[in-house]
Image: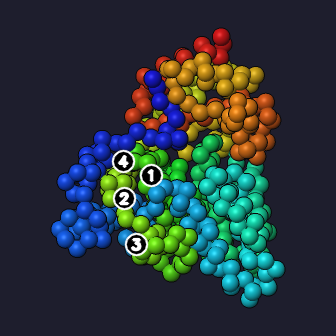
Amino acid sequence: MIYLDNNATTKVDREVIDAMLPYLGEYFGNPSSDHPYGIKARQAVESSRAMVAGLINASDDEIIFTSGGTEANNMAIIGTSLLFSSRTVTRKSHGKGHIITSCVEHPSVLNPCRYLHDIGFDVTYLPVDRYGLISLHSLDNAIRGDTILITIMHANNEIGSIEPIAEIGRIAKQKDIVFHSDAAQSIGKSHIDVQELGLDLMTIVSHKFYGPKGIGALYIRKGVEIKPILFGAGHERGLRPGTENVPGIVGLGKACEIAKRDTGTRLSLFRTLSERLFNGLLKAIPDIRLNGHKTERLQNTLNITFPGISSARLLSAIRDRVSVSAGSACHSGIQKPSPVLKAIGLTDEDALSSVRFSLGKDNTEDEIGKAVEIISVAVRG
């Protein structure tokens, strides 16, 4: 089996597993306890917090641990909006405030925005061009006197296109608007510096870069406030109550430490493998088309349309040998085209003929060659 679905999830790194194991057994204490078991757990949590911060050029106290990307996105978007809604009166708002996002965000961003719209906030969903990128001019024009939040993903999970985050950050800072980015797909696949990007809030997801599932983090720049959306004890600066998932936090920290060490090597590998994969498929199937930006894209991600070929049937033909994702969603046996692919201008037919390949650090050139052969035979058959 050749695994090329690393944007869905990654295999946990052996170094990460080894780091976690002691905290599943010997060091089982509650970090809130003052005896040696608790102190050992608390030290592990804070050490991991420093590792996460070190990867993105943040301070330790700017990192809040969450259960994953969905919680971090909800915390950032809803927490910011609820805090700022009381201030919109001075901005002459007719509602509770205005939020700007894009139409190609992950559901864990789009659905919190829809919830906020339902309770009285205004939301603008920026369109994207054929590469999946927003227009800075459109963003600037969308800003109003009561705009309280801009939330734009760093890189798209389906097509890999990287948004102009640093430029958005400059606009947000000039207009005194809080800026959040969902970087779930970017960590470990590109160099992320929150200072260079001008981010106030950023979502980090462990299982997208060889850490465990069920753990993530939210970067909150010093001076930026959000309201808690969960209520309990005072864990994580009072923003995320609940006993910490110590083994998961340790795993996330170790994954960040490894990413800081290895991202350069990974990027070089991804470039080599993605070029071999695309060029190999293009040679065998000349009418394929790449979706997303040719250069401003995650190096590990290729979204390809196979004209006239049902992606569902293609995946069915190769699923025992190559693991990839289709450019569609299946609900009750009905195939629906991806909203992201529709947003960049693909027809329903082309969207339903598209496949996402997402490479990982453990893939080899030999695997890519075999995958090209398997897919080419399946398409021609």
- Secondary structure found at label 2: loop
Q: CA distance from mark 3 to mark 2?
A: 12 Å
Give the residue type that dot 3 points to.
His
> Which disc, if any, is residue 262?
4
Q: Nearer the viewer, mark 4 or mark 2?
A: 2
- The answer to whether residue 354 is visible is yes
- The answer to whether residue 137 is visible is no
Percent x, y for residue 243?
37, 65
Q: CA distance from mark 3 to mark 4?
A: 32 Å
> Between residues 79 and 171, which one lies in front from this camera angle?
79
In the picture, measured across the screen, residue 244 lies left or right of residue 82, that is left
From the image, tell me which residue sits under label 3. 235
Q: Are marks 4 and 1 in contact (CB under 8 Å)?
A: no
Percent x, y for residue 98?
74, 72
Q: How many marks?
A: 4
Which comes sooner in the sequence, label 1 or label 2? 1
Give the residue type that dot 2 points to.
Asn
Q: Quadrant of the N terminus?
A: top left
In the picture, measured across the screen, residue 297 lies left or right of residue 30, that is right
Q: CA distance from mark 1 to mark 2?
A: 9 Å
Q: Are marks 1 and 2 in contact (CB under 8 Å)?
A: yes
- Secondary structure found at label 3: loop
Q: CA distance from mark 4 to mark 1?
A: 23 Å
> Taking 333 as reference, is 239 above or below it?
below
**Mark 3, other Cα within 10 Å: few <14 / some 14–19 / many ≥20:** some
Q: Are marks 3 and 4 in contact (CB under 8 Å)?
A: no
Q: Residue at x 41, y 76 (%)?
A: 234
> Between residues 110 and 60, which one lies in front from this camera angle?
110
Give the residue type that dot 1 points to.
Gly
Q: Residue at x 50, y 72 (%)?
A: 231
Q: Nearer the viewer, mark 4 or mark 1?
A: 1
